[in-house]
Image (tube, grey):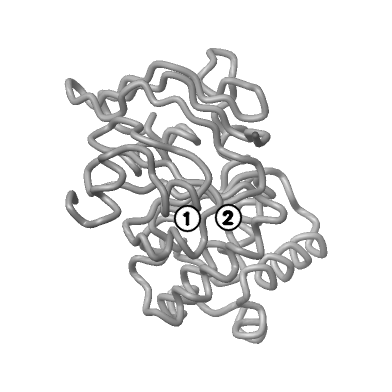
């Protein structure tokens, strides 16, 4: 047994008449890396975006069920969505930089949440760049436009920016899919380091990556939760025939 940081209970998501997630119930372990795997179009990104209510931004979306974070249902009527998203750092497939300097990309989040002290902001920027493995590469360029960084550096900057608001959880949607192998390795190494302090959930279509990183695995197929459990069990000795077929490359 493990302590769930996030508990998903009978979660259903509809985009209009399209039933994308169907009665999903699973726990996400605290301070471990959970991989969401499955074929394209099976609902992986929708599940990830449900964990910080980014699905709310899709026109015509309907959500039922519960997602408990620290025991609180984030879909409850009393919940402040901004505070929910502050708990959830988010990294997309393609780096989505702000049109600002390297420094301001990281300082933006803390400023939005009320940080004004210059020394405090400087410390936050430096700390987050260290944690993301980028400090030594950019410490003399902080006022340069972030757009001048390489794609791999941009993705690590997005990681630093996500950490700057002091989240509890990191949600990563195929965070290495746009990167070269060396840059992808940098991101993977940082995620392995960060799991001692953060709960990490990432979507991947690369089974080798899931095997390298994941402590826990959630396997979706056409919106259904087929199997979930400790990574070694699911990836090497799956119980369900559909999981076995997916891991063998027989369904995609």
Element assignment for label 2: helix
Task: Kindly identify the residue that appears in the image at 49 percent across and 73 percent down.
Answer: 146
Q: Is residue 141 left or right of residue 99?
A: right
How far is the residue under mark 1 from the one under mark 2?
7 Å
Callout 1 crowding tier (Cα within 10 Å): few <14, some 14–19, many ≥20:
many
Residue found farthest to the top: 77
Is residue 60 positioned above or below 115 on the image? above
Is residue 56 positioned above or below 102 on the image? above
Q: Quadrant of residue 236?
A: bottom left
Residue 201 seen from this side? no
**Mark on residue 137?**
none
Q: Is residue 42 left or right of residue 167?
A: left
Q: State the quadrant of the N terminus.
A: top right
Depth order, front residue of 72/162: 72
**Mark on residue 91?**
1
Depth order, front residue of 117/11: 11
Element assignment for label 1: strand
- The x, y position of residue 107, in whole percent, is 64, 60
């Amino acid at each position: 047994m493990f302590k769930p940081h996030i508990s998903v209970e009978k979660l259903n998501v509809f985009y209009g008449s399209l039933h994308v997630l169907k009665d999903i119930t699973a726990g996400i372990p605290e301070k471990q890396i959970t991989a969401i795997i499955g074929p394209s179009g099976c609902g992986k990104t929708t599940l990830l975006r449900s964990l910080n209510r980014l699905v709310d931004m899709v026109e015509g979306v309907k959500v039922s069920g519960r997602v408990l974070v620290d025991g609180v249902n984030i879909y409850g009527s009393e919940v402040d969505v901004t505070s929910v998203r502050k708990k959830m750092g988010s990294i997309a497939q393609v780096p989505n930089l702000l049109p600002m300097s390297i420094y301001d990309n990281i300082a933006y989040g803390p400023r939005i949440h009320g940080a004004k002290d210059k020394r405090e902001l400087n410390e936050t920027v430096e700390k987050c760049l260290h944690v993301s493995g980028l400090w030594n590469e950019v410490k003399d360029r902080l006022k340069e436009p972030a757009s001048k960084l390489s794609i791999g550096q941009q993705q690590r900057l997005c990681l630093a920016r996500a950490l700057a608001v002091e989240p509890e959880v990191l949600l990563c949607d195929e965070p290495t899919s746009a990167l070269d192998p060396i840059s992808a390795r940098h991101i993977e190494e940082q995620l392995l380091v960060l799991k001692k302090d953060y709960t990490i959930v990432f979507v991947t279509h690369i089974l080798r990556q899931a095997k390298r990183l994941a402590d826990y695995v959630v396997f979706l197929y056409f919106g259904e939760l087929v199997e979930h459990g400790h990574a070694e069990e699911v990836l090497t000795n799956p119980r369900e025939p559909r999981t076995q077929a997916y891991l063998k490359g027989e369904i995609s």
